[in-house]
Image (cartoon, rainbow, N blue to C red):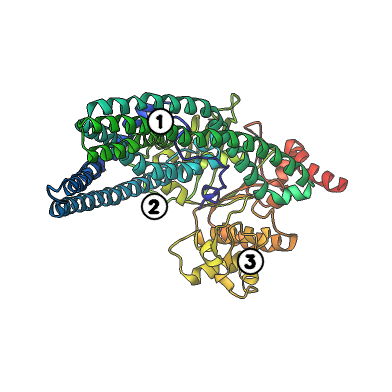
């Protein structure tokens, strides 16, 4: 069992803003490439998307035809009134009724197609983002630890939260709104031309003026929205950092400094947000101004043509309605453009994460772990991290018999924890080999290899859930009785029974309702429950008091029997009974032997051992 693989840290805030007219968000670096990948990922939904596009076009067309037919009602009423005035007839109510029925059918059909396309597209968006979240979750477990060494935990979490959320919100809107807006512009233009090409020409002149306003506003607001997004990320990150470390801030009286930093970030965000929102707010008034000027021109020209008998009164009414709706799709297309940019920027990050190189696949003919005894051999092991020019492990060799208790000691940076990471195959050795029972660990499946180990780390970890569930994490198939038995061996049972809910006591998100020492005991109980072939202890008793430590050491002797145990220790007094002590310095084993032998040598170990007592005397 591995304690640190499940550690989850809160994300540093990334201020993701949704696209809107005049609101450029974040642009994809490779727009075409990302768009092509998006279409590929949406391939499973292409049939449904085709239906969505058909419904969107049909709904828009039925809605566009309406005003012209409604104009026929106005024409019938106008001509009927004129017939009454001249005494040649009256209003044809039957014709008006038929037109009204036709309009009713058209609008009902438009609404039905609109509902259907919304229903289908929401389903596509949610299924697509569900598959992305699932893919990200699976990908996290397939990535090598090298990736997470270079990435902020919050950055990875933001893929599955902020970025996927951005995709979900913008996907269905951007696709359907783009088709609807484009169809509306084309459809309205065709209807206007069918009424009067001269008046349509005047209406078209509104488009370049509108586009000029959109381009100018978007161009000037771009930098402010980028600044707003960046500064929002600073504010969120600062708040998250201050919240998660509020105890440390109070200890060092850093409240005033923290507040000053927040005010600096907040002030910068305020100015960037004010300017960006101001430019964004200018978009609609500017478009209304252009639209109203065109509306006035059409009214004057329409009145002139009606007086000349070129067009009917109903057609003027229809044209005016089309004119008032003509600039709206232009604004929507600008909105769609920004939504698409935001969505593709989020897609680019998610796709890049999903395409990260995974751990080298296990061998198809992997060796079975049955009958493993636990004999471990390090053969001239060398290792260095990617970002480290100096090798962390230079030439590590050791033979460890099964069932023996091995301690690894040395100063900070000697490579003690790295040896454990190599043993668990969190990283693969740069050179040399590690063998268990004479079999190279690369010949095992990683899951099988890690199932041989139980691990208790200095940094404890517990999740939100009951104490029973936290201990059972060591063996998910264990019965309640087995969990309680493991708890008794780890000295957990006594303090658990002091809680009113006992083993069903719920731990909060940060496990602050139990002490650090109690949390350490829970992780030790997991190791008991896992019943491993090999055991790794990294300062496992560092967070408990002396009396409890003595009890745990006694229980550990029972746990260690028949198992190969690796103990990383800084307090050398805790490993005096180890069968073999490996003394490391600068990535090499410089001494090895048992406690008495190493003290007798009077070398590096003897100095390390005596130095801890000197520190105690100074204290």
Marks 3/2: CA–CA distance: 31 Å
Q: Is residue 34 left or right of residue 596?
A: left
- Give the camera-side residue of 333 and 369: 333
Residue at the image position 28 percent from the left and 40 percent from the top:
317
The residue indicated by pointer 3 is 491
In the structure shown, which secondary structural element does the residue marked by tag 2 occupy? loop
In the structure shown, which secondary structural element does the residue marked by tag 3 occupy? loop
Q: Is residue 518 above or below residue 177?
A: below
Q: Is residue 239 left or right of residue 83?
A: right
Furthest-bottom residue in this view: 500
The residue indicated by pointer 2 is 370
Local packing at callout 3 (Cα closer than 10 Å; few below 14, some 14-19, many 20+) is: many
- Give the camera-side residue of 26 and 469: 26
Q: Is residue 177 left or right of residue 155?
A: left
Question: If you read the primary sequence from the N terminus, does the residue marked by circle 1 or circle 2 appear first?
Answer: 1
Question: Where is residue 69 shown, x and y percent of the image?
Answer: 20, 44
Question: Where is residue 225 shown, x and y percent of the image?
Answer: 53, 33
Question: Where is residue 470 shown, x and y percent of the image?
Answer: 53, 62
Q: Is residue 530 left or right of residue 100?
A: right
Disc 3 versus disc 2: nearer the observer? 3
Residue at the image position 68 percent from the left and 61 percent from the top:
515
Residue 293 bears which disc, if any? 1
Location of residue 180 (image quadrant): top left
- Give the camera-side residue of 52 and 408: 52
The answer to whether one can see residue 609 in this image is: yes
Marks 1/2: CA–CA distance: 84 Å
Question: Where is residue 23 shown, x and y percent of the image?
Answer: 48, 34
Contact, CB < 8 Å: mark 1 with mark 3? no
Local packing at callout 2 (Cα closer than 10 Å; few below 14, some 14-19, many 20+) is: few
């Amino acid at each position: 069992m591995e304690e640190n693989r499940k550690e989850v840290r809160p994300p540093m805030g990334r201020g993701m803003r949704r696209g809107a007219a005049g609101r450029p968000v974040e642009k994809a670096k490779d727009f075409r490439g990302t768009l092509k990948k998006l279409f590929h990922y949406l391939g499973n939904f292409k049939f449904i998307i085709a239906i969505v596009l058909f419904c969107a076009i049909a709904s828009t067309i039925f809605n566009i035809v309406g005003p012209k037919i409604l104009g026929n009602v106005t024409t019938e009423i106008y001509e009927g009134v004129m017939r009454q005035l001249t005494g040649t007839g009256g209003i044809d109510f039957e014709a008006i009724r038929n037109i009204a029925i036709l309009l009713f059918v058209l609008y009902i059909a438009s609404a039905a197609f609109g509902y259907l396309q919304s229903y289908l597209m929401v389903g596509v968006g949610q299924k697509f983002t569900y598959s992305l979240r699932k893919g990200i979750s699976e990908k996290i477990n397939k990535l090598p630890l090298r990736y997470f060494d270079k990435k902020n935990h919050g950055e990875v979490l933001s893929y599955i939260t902020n970025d996927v959320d951005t995709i979900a919100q913008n996907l269905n809107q951007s696709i359907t709104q783009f088709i609807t807006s484009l169809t509306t512009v084309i459809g309205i233009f065709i209807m206007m031309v069918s009424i009067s090409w001269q008046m349509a020409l005047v209406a078209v002149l509104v488009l370049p003026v509108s586009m000029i306003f959109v381009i100018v506003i978007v161009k000037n607001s771009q930098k402010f929205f980028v600044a707003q997004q960046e500064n929002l990320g600073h504010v969120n990150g600062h708040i998250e950092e201050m919240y998660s470390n509020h105890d440390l801030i109070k200890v060092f009286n850093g409240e005033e400094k923290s507040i000053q930093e927040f005010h600096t970030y907040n002030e910068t965000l305020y100015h960037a947000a004010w300017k960006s929102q101001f430019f964004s707010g200018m978009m609609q008034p500017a478009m209304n101004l252009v639209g109203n000027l065109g509306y006035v021109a059409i009214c004057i020209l329409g009145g002139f043509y009606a007086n000349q008998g070129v067009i009917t009164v109903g057609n003027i009414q229809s044209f005016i309605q089309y004119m008032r709706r003509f600039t709206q799709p232009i604004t929507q297309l600008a909105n769609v453009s920004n939504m698409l940019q935001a969505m593709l920027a989020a897609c680019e990050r998610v796709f890049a994460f999903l395409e990260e190189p995974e751990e080298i696949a296990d061998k198809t003919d992997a060796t079975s772990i049955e009958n493993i005894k636990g004999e471990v051999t390090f053969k001239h092991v060398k290792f260095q991290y990617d970002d480290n020019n100096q090798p962390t492990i230079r030439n590590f060799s050791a033979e460890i018999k099964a069932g023996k208790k091995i301690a690894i000691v040395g100063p900070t940076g000697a490579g003690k924890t790295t040896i454990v990471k190599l043993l668990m195959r969190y990283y693969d050795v740069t050179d040399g080999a590690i063998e268990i029972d004479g079999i190279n660990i690369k010949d095992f499946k990683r899951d099988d290899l890690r199932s041989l180990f139980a691990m208790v780390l200095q940094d404890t970890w517990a999740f939100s859930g009951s104490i029973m569930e936290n201990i059972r994490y060591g063996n998910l198939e264990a019965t309640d009785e087995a969990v309680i038995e493991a708890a008794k061996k780890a000295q957990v049972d006594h303090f658990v029974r002091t809680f009113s809910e006992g083993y069903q006591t719920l731990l909060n998100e940060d496990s602050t309702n139990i002490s650090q020492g109690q949390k350490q005991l829970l992780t030790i109980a997991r190791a008991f429950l896992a019943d491993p072939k090999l055991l790794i202890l990294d300062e496992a008793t560092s967070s408990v008091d002396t009396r409890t430590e003595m009890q745990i050491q006694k229980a550990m002797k029972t746990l260690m029997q028949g198992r190969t145990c690796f103990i990383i220790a800084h307090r050398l007094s805790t490993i005096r009974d180890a069968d073999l002590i490996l003394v490391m310095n600068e990535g090499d084993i410089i001494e090895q032997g048992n406690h008495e032998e190493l003290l007798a040598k009077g070398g590096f170990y003897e100095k390390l051992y005596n130095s801890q007592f000197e520190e105690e005397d100074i204290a």
